[in-house]
């Protein structure tokens, strides 16, 4: 009799333990499902890879509200190998310089002659230019020369490219209508460049339309900016929001 009772008690205990285990298993499965759900919600669906945005220094933004440090000097500056307006060497970051060479070669193959003008400009040079302009303009900033730290040329990724007819003249938006300007606007993206200061983005870039100013961002980003028609300011805001949403 005692044995039977003991047996029954043990059986009951087993069932209880078993139930507990099953409940715990259920809970674990639910937690896993929740985690899985969170992961699904956190899927990266922005058109540019997360790793690229977190590591690329070719998407740096320099403008009046995003000033580059006065000590910022790119560490991989090289002399560009393309045809230039003057004999003064032009420097750019290595990847940008290589892309520029490829762009000039493709242009040449299409019968387009391009000339490089201004590439990397140091903070100090920009500062001198800025104060010279102020002096010339009775101390007033007329927006022609960028405030030191805000110039795209300090990134080492910006370059001014014009045609033969433009040599020695003031750059104007009329360049966009020349065959060289048209070629650049159509093909620069294929080499990782963007037209940094577009006509319909003047209120965002706070810089007048400059169809001659190319800016290297890398091919994945340039292709995306071509099809989305975003300027660098809009792109920066967009990708930073995507990264923030993904990380929080
Ligand atoms: Zn420029």
Image (cartoon, rainbow, N blue to C red):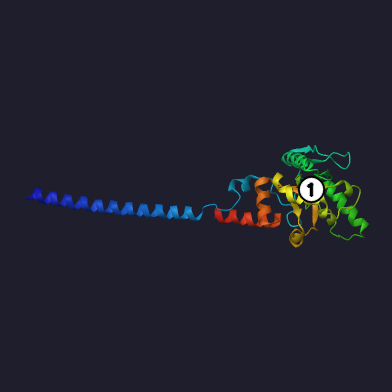
Task: Give above or below for 244 relative to 219.
Answer: below
Residue lying at 35% horizontally and 54% vertically, measured from the top left: 27
Mark 1 lies within 8 Å of ligand 1 (Cβ measured): yes
- Residue 81 location (% of width, % of height): 80, 37
Residue located beneath label 1 in the image: 153
Residue lying at 71% horizontally and 56% vertically, measured from the top left: 231
Q: Nearer the viewer, residue 18 or 38?
A: 38
Q: Is disc 1 placed on a helix, strand or loop?
A: helix
* Residue furthest bottom as drawn: 203
Query: Is 248 placed left or right of 17 in the picture?
Result: right
Q: Quadrant of residue 33?
A: bottom left
- Residue 216 location (% of width, % of height): 73, 46
Q: Is residue 146 visible?
A: no
Q: Is residue 177 visible?
A: yes
Residue lying at 83% horizontally and 56% vertically, measured from the top left: 173
Query: Within 10 angstroms of label 1, few (less than 14), some, or many (20 or more) residues?
Result: many
Residue lying at 29% horizontally and 51% vertically, measured from the top left: 21
Q: How many marks?
A: 1
Q: The C terminus is located in which quarter?
A: bottom right
- Residue 126 location (% of width, % of height): 83, 49
Q: Nearer the viewer, residue 152 or 25?
A: 152
Query: Is 88 placed left or right of 97 in the picture?
Result: right
- Residue 93 location (% of width, % of height): 75, 41
Query: Is 29 placed left or right of 177 in the picture?
Result: left
Task: Give above or below for 188 relative to 209.
Answer: above
Q: Quadrant of residue 146?
A: bottom right
């Amino acid at each position: 009799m005692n044995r039977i009772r003991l047996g029954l008690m043990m059986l009951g205990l087993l069932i209880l333990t078993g139930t507990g285990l099953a409940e715990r298993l259920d809970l674990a499965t639910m937690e896993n499902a929740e985690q899985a759900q969170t992961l699904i919600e956190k899927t990266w669906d922005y058109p540019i890879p997360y790793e690229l945005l977190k590591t690329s220094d070719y998407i740096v933004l320099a403008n009046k509200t995003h000033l580059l440090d006065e000590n910022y000097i790119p560490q991989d500056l090289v002399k560009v190998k393309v045809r230039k307006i003057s004999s003064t060497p032009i420097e750019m970051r290595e990847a940008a310089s290589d892309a520029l060479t490829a762009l000039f070669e493709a242009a040449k193959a299409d019968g387009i002659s391009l000339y490089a003008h201004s590439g990397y400009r140091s903070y100090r040079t920009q500062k001198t230019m800025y104060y010279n302009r102020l002096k010339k303009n009775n101390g007033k900033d007329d927006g022609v020369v960028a405030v030191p730290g805000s110039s795209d040329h300090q990134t080492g990724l910006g370059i001014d490219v014009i045609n033969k007819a433009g040599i020695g003249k003031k750059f104007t938006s009329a360049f966009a209508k020349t065959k060289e300007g048209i070629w650049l606007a159509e093909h620069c993206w294929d080499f990782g460049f963007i037209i940094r200061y577009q006509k319909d983005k003047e209120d965002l870039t706070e810089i007048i339309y400059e169809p001659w100013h190319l800016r290297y961002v890398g091919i994945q980003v340039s292709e995306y900016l071509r099809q989305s028609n975003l300027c660098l300011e809009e792109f920066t805001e967009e990708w930073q929001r995507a990264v923030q949403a993904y990380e929080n």
